[in-house]
Amino acid sequence: MPHLSSNSLTRLWGSYKRSVRRVVLPDSDVRSKTISYWRNEIFLNILVFISPLSIIALVPSVYMSFANNLLVVGIADLFVFALIIMIMFRRNMSLNLRKTIFIAIIFGLSVILLYYLPRPGPGLIFLLVITVFSAVIYSPKAAFYSACANTVVCCVFAGLLYLRLDIPITAEYTVGSWIAISSNLVFLSFVCAQCLNLLLRGLEFSLDDSRKLTSNLTSIINSTDSRIYSLDTNFRFITFNEPLKNALKLNWGVGVKPGDHAFSFLENVSTEEFNFWEGVYTEAMTGKTMRFERDFDFGTLHTTTDFSLCPIIDKGSIAGISCFASDITDLKRARLEVQELNEGLERKVAERTTELVFINRELMEVKEEIHSQNDILEQRIIQRTTQYAFMSQINQSIVHIKDEQSLLRNACLIAIKTGNFEMAWIGMFDADYKTLSLSAQQGMAPEQVDAFRDVISKINGPEANVLKSNSYFICNDIEKDFDLEIGKSFSIEHDIHSCMVLPIRKFTKIVGVFSFYARERHFFRPEEVALLAEVAGDISFALENFEKESRHKATEDLVIKNEKRFRSLVENGADAIFILSEDGRYNYVSPSVEQVLGYSEQQAMKSEMFALIHPEDLTKARKAWAQTLSAPAVAIRGLICRMQHQDNSWRWIECTFTNMLHDASLRGIVNNFRDVTERIKVKTQLSNTAVALAGALSDLQKIMDASLDIICSIDEAGKFVKVSKACESILGFKPEDMLGQKYIDLVVKDDIESTSKVAEQVMNGIPATSFENRCLHKNGSVVPILWSATWDANDRLMYCIAKDNTERKKDDAERLGLIEGLQAKNNDLQQFSYIVSHNLRAPIANILGLTSIIDKESTQNSFLLNKLTAETSKLDEVVKDINVVVSARKLEHDKFQNVRFESKLTSIVQVLDTEIIESGASITTDFRPAETIWTIKSYLYSILYNLVSNAIKYRRPDTQLRIEIATTKDDKVICLSVKDNGIGIDLAKNGTKLFGMYKRFHAGAIPGKGIGLNLVKTHVETLGGRMEVESEIDKGTTFRVFLPKNYETNNAA
Amino acid sequence: MKQTTQLKNIVLIDDEDVTNLINTKIISLYYEANIVSYSSAQVALEHFKGTDPDSPTLPDYIFLDINMPVMDGWEFLSEFQKFPLHKIGSCKIYMLSSSIDRDDIEKTKTFPSTHGFISKPLTKEKLAILE
């Protein structure tokens, strides 16, 4: 068919194939290509090809058979052909039935051919083909069945030949030749069956294996997280696993299927990225194995992927590349962390090492220190041993030596020899401690000894120190400490650096000093001191013993002496003695009675003692007498009575009675008496004085205690010696709590420095008057104190008066407040006069000017009169303003109450309605932070009104006016802010004048009298608040009003 | 009474136009003069300066108000004194204020360029200075 193109032929062939397939294999599974799939495929192909091909065999064979009168063959051929067509196109027939019918048809055909056309024998070929077909389309077993069937057919025909029946085959073959030919067929059939059997089984196995392998591999690559894919040489996807598919879907938003171009996903990426991938893929295609990491940025997701590309080698040439990509973001992060950790560790180790080195160095130092300490200790031990030897030797001499001088001399000698001292001496004071004489010495140069004779005790010398402190004196570095000039030069000359002076006592009284001198600095340590003190104590003890012994001797002498002394005393003393009988008569009268009472011995003997006693004192005297009688041998003292002198005057006589009636030698009562008139007089005077003094003192005390101020005395150490009672009311401490306390402890920390400075001045003789500081009350509160203080050099005391300054401070504050008030008033007055002189005068001047013109120019009168009216109304306004300003200063008018910002603003908006509409202002508010305030309603109104109307007045003509009103608060203050975007104010230039009365900063066009802000300020200040302003030219202005939250309550308190 | 010879140049500086109007009228009643009034001291100053501050165009008389917004009379005087001396010499400045404040009168004397203090309103007697 010439008009059909090859293309349409191909299409026709294709649709033919498809229609056959639809009938024969309607539900073949393409994916599982097992051996049975291929059997069916082969069967299908045989069917597809057999019908067109069989036409080639059919046409000549039908023609030949009809030409040769072989009708049966021709009909059979046609019949077979029809059957095959039926198999191909008949629906609803199972595949196996089709196969069976197909095999049966061919088998039948071959038998017919064998029967009718035994030579050249296409039947035999057909039989062989059946065997091959059965093996291919059925199973290997079927081939054997077919081979068996072939054998049977051959045998049947051999039987027919043997029977010599009249059939075509007998004309062609003998039994022998048939067997020879057919046996070949049988043989070939079996060989074919066997061989095909082996071939197909093997194929089945390997197909199975590869199928299993593929499915295993698929499940493996799909179960990994890594993305695995392979590309062919044209960079198209051959295969890929699920993770890749998901990743592409997720990150790139595309689906993928085999055959897609790998670069199609890179259309939207940067050229750089594209070039990179093109590069690596191309390079991998050259057979190179590649491994690299790549960072991706998918919006917020940052990932790092590890890629490895491998060429796929198929039959020695590169068939594509396999790619293995795994997400190593976490790994990388972990790697980084590990790296950081390592670095941190290394750093720490380095630090530790430095520390260790440092510690080691310190340890070395400590070690050296210990070594040197050890040396010192060793030296000390040696020294200690010497000291003990010294002490024991001294003790021995104390035991052995019985006189003072030799003991002292010996002690000095031992000190030099055993004690290793450079020099030692013992000096004795005289009774008044005026001089110190050298009693014993060792190691002193002769000229020194000479210089030492009866040295006058130095006020500041070590010996004087010993006397003063009643203890030993140590100087461990004479060059530095010793303030005795002579001692210093001497010690330097003799290389002496330490000295110690110990007191030597007799019955606790210091009588001398024992001095030791050593070359070594810091020789006298506590241990040495203790030992030496003991030595000095021992010597003192020895001296006391010597003294006791000598005293004992003296007593004996005294007894003898006393007898004599007594006599002379009795005979010539100031005291007179009566010895009286039990009834008061005189047994003996000492001659000295004449000196006392003027009577001679004889006169006295005649009188009676009680007769001489003043009647008023008689009772007292008799009482003493009775007491004497009742207590023998006890001296009854204390009777002072008046006795009559011979000149009749009364004398005060002190009597001491002793009942000696039991004493055989006396047998009487001894009255030892003396004239004490003078003494009594003095005593009376004294007691009067004492009473007066006591009175004065108690008066003083009363005055002190009555004083509202603290009157106190403070000693040199800054401790209270005496404090008046007022301290309790002022500082809360009782006077007794204060005594001994340091005044500086009372002073507030910040004032300590200034207080100490003043105290120092006072102690240098400059009295302090009205020094102010703050002290701490017992309850912790701070009290301002006003001090005046003087220093008394005699008493070495500072006398102070401390006044509670709280009231004065308060007064001062009040005064300041008054002054401020007055100043404010003054300012107001000044402003008032300013208004009068300028603003009030201006319209008046204008009115005057206008009236002066009126007469002259009658034609213009109405114009001038209008001006006149305007000026007059201005005048009126100024007068009103003054009224407003003056009344604004009176707080009493209004009451405090809770006022809502919102409600005030609403009423203002209503009043300013016209202006707001005219100006097109938009007002936004935020009163949420503080919605109400405790204040005076009209003031708040005035403040808000003026600020808002100012904002409207001073708007920028070219900009829509925005006013933002808001409140904020903290615990004390509520802040109201009014912010606009108006023309602003040059604060640098006008800041100070901003709130002044009648101050204006904008020329001409804007109406204003310059009173609003002044009024606002006055109101705010009246409410106890303050104002702040923030402004920038052509940007806008923000006024902030800070009002105290509860001004009234605070004020009331 | 009217001066017919050379016309004097008089400048009035007052922020209130009414005042300027009144003063112009009063002066015109008694004298024939070229009277120019400014409602802003700054504008007046700029006008005097012209293009060259070293050779300003100054009138024969200036009546200057004290209390004005933006630039008051004193500030004007401070600026005015920066003009060259020989130019200032021929220009007489009088403070013309409604103020009756002593301080203002005293302060006027501290400016060498001023010739006197006139309290508003202007009268025939006060204008004798123009003769």
Image (cartoon, helix red, strand yellow):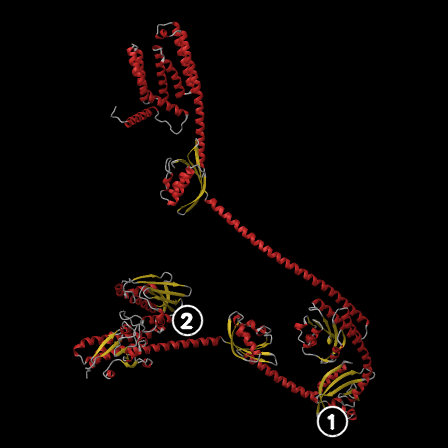
- Mark 1 is surrounded, within 10 Å at the Cα level, by few (under 14), some (14 to 19) or many (20 or more) other residues, namely some
- The verdict on a common chain for dots 1 and 2 is yes
Q: Which residue is mark 1?
A: A646
Q: Which residue is mark 2?
A: A1051
> In the figure, A323 relative to A779: above or below?
above
**Which one is closest to the eye, mark 1 or mark 2?**
2
Q: Earlier in the sequence, mark 1 or mark 2?
A: 1
Q: Look at the image and tell me whether residue A506 can be seen.
A: no
Q: Nearer the viewer, residue A872 or A292?
A: A292
**Image coords of residue A840 (percent x, y):** 28, 77
Residue at far bottom of view: A647
Q: Does dot 1 land on a helix, a strand or a loop?
A: loop
Q: Which mark is residue A865?
A: none
Secondary element at tag 2:
helix
Q: Dot 2, how many residues are within 10 Å of its Cα: few (below 14), some (14-19), or many (20+)? A: few
Dividing the picture into quarters, in which one does residue A1 lie? top left
Please name whichever residue, A680 or A2, is drawn nearer the observer in this view of the structure.
Answer: A2
The kind of residue tagged 1 is Gln
